[in-house]
Amino acid sequence: MTEIKEKISSCIMERLERYYLYIQRLSEQGQVWISSQELAEGLNLTSSTVRQDISHLNFSGISKRGYELVKLRQTLRSVLGLDTRYATVIVGAGNFGRALLLHDDFREKGFDIKAIFDNNPKLIGKRIESYYIQSIDKLTAVVKKNNVRIGVIAVPAKAAQEVADKLTAAGVNGILNLSTANVQIPQGKVIVNSHIILDFIQLAFYLNE
Amino acid sequence: MTEIKEKISSCIMERLERYYLYIQRLSEQGQVWISSQELAEGLNLTSSTVRQDISHLNFSGISKRGYELVKLRQTLRSVLGLDTRYATVIVGAGNFGRALLLHDDFREKGFDIKAIFDNNPKLIGKRIESYYIQSIDKLTAVVKKNNVRIGVIAVPAKAAQEVADKLTAAGVNGILNLSTANVQIPQGKVIVNSHIILDFIQLAFYLNE
DNA sequence: TAGATTGTTAATCGATTAACAATC
DNA sequence: TAGATTGTTAATCGATTAACAATC
């Protein structure tokens, strides 16, 4: 598995994710086989790229038929690391934090949200469906108890670094940073930045072309 | 300007956005000059890449000092298309739609949210701060009246294509798709996909390396 | 068998980096 | 002037595409 991962650049990985979501949907609809051509058309790629990507996975298709959806999906799940579950916490109980908390898609894909934290005394103790907003002081205890691996930063940019420090100190290995801050983390930890404003700006750019 | 844009691949553009946000923050803190080296360190790039990127902008630095922050920021704003405002609507008044609606950052960057729509009769007419959730039937009228250029799809995947069709038919030019659906749009229109689940999956991948 | 589609090699294309002369 | 940093050219590196033999 490690050898497979080494061949996968971040560029290929991003496509693998899209294959996974696309295939998932087709297989729910009952489709059984898919050709590199069809996958390429669905995702705006060339069939050559698709075949190259899949060749990195130790997975084989069959001439004249293509790839077996269910098996390809399982291979992708395993390569992407989606056959384990990830205990997750959210820091920041603002609108985005709450929206994430209530979004079923994450649980379904393997991300179990264990708790949500805030440092605003007015919010602490408030209930959001089955969750109670907890004081950030409880973070370390919750992380340890639940073996939390992922922490989501859903606080304003200026508080982001502090939250990241608390999360990594508590033992979280991966951070999803929703703030626009440029957060620094210790070696060996992983951070993925997700700034929706960047997507708006991208749209602005293309609208002026 | 068009000639500048032609030189900018999507790859460079994504970095330009990050320069913009980073520089914005530094200039708020009162910094006046920045070197390619400093910018590179802040964003995990090489100074060579930074200089190459900036050289595409018809913008010059000064030897021994670097780039003047305020001017570079203005250039980036203009190249990225951020010196106009974008009337925007949100379709889908679920948790994400609401979170976006209430997020100040967008207005500040030039995206004016004019209205939020839903097709759920229980939600229509409900108030969210200064907005009232409107029936999707009102979409076309609102788009025309406000010269709306951007539509955000914040509905479940299975309704996404239908919403996209309505948005483009109403005259919107750009779509930000938050659902995981693979939405097709007419030639000449622009779509940017933003699927937060992909960022979670990315994290899962890197956590297993 | 004939035709279609994979898997893989080699060619092309583009992005990143290195290096250094020009400049402040 | 000496040293630092830009701007730019050329080299390297990696990703995408084309092409086609192997296979079903």
Image (cartoon, coloured by chain):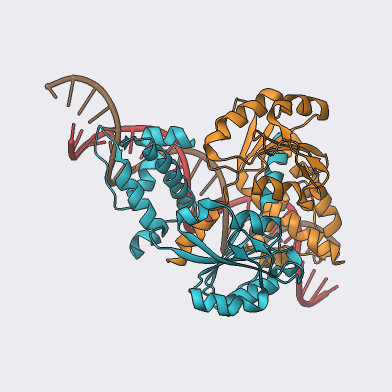
Chain colours: A cyan, B orange, C brown, D red
Is residue B66 shown to the viewer in this render?
no
Residue A200 placement: quadrant: top right
Q: Quadrant of the N terminus of chain A?
A: bottom left
Q: Position of residue B156 (x, y in %)?
A: 56, 40
Residue visible at 31% across and 44% down?
Answer: A70
Q: Position of residue B182 (x, y in %)?
A: 52, 37
In the image, residue B207 above or below residue A169: above
Residue visible at 77% across and 31% down?
Answer: B148
Residue visible at 77% across and 24% down?
Answer: B141
Residue visible at 54% across and 73% down?
Answer: A172
Left or right: B88, with B202 as reference point: right
Residue A22 placement: quadrant: top left
Q: Position of residue C3 (x, y in %)?
A: 24, 22
Q: Quadrant of the C terminus of chain A?
A: top right
In the image, residue B68 above or below residue B10: below
Camera-side residue: A91 or B24?
A91
Left or right: B114, with C16 as reference point: right
Q: Position of residue B118 (x, y in %)?
A: 67, 36
